[in-house]
Image: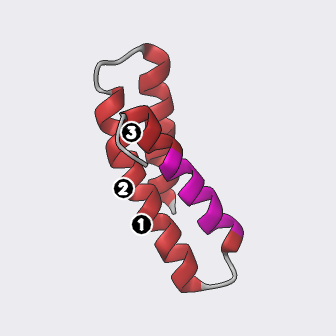
Amino acid sequence: MMNCAEVCQACANLQLSGSQYAQKLCDVCAEICEACATSCEAIGQMDDCGAACRHCAESCREMAGVGV
């Protein structure tokens, strides 16, 4: 879960600075957020976390220009 939070913050920072690497990192972010959601579901009783991670993954894919 910490990886998800950290990469989301890094994505936001790159986007705010107008970095040419923001799109690439958003693609990786989506992958990490999906893995976090899967982990939350496997743990159980973490539906809110799983839903938030899946929503974040969707947003990251959109920002990366990758099909949802």
- Tell me the SS state at disc 1: helix
**Magenta part of the chain:** 48-58
Residue 44 lies, in percent from the top left, at 62, 85
Q: Which residue is mark 2?
A: 31
Mark 3 or mark 2, earlier in chain: 3
Q: Is residue 21 left or right of residue 45?
A: left
Residue tagged 3:
26
Q: Residue at x 33, y 37 (%)?
A: 25
Tag count: 3
Q: Residue furthest front?
A: 67
- In percent of width and height, residue 29 lies at 40, 47
The residue where tag 1 is placed is 35
Color style of the picture: secondary structure
Residue 15: percent from left, percent from top: 45, 23
State the predominant SS element of the stretch in magenta.
Answer: helix
Q: Which residue corresponds to the image point at 59% horizontal and 53% vertical from the top-left?
A: 55
Q: CA distance from mark 1 to mark 3?
A: 14 Å
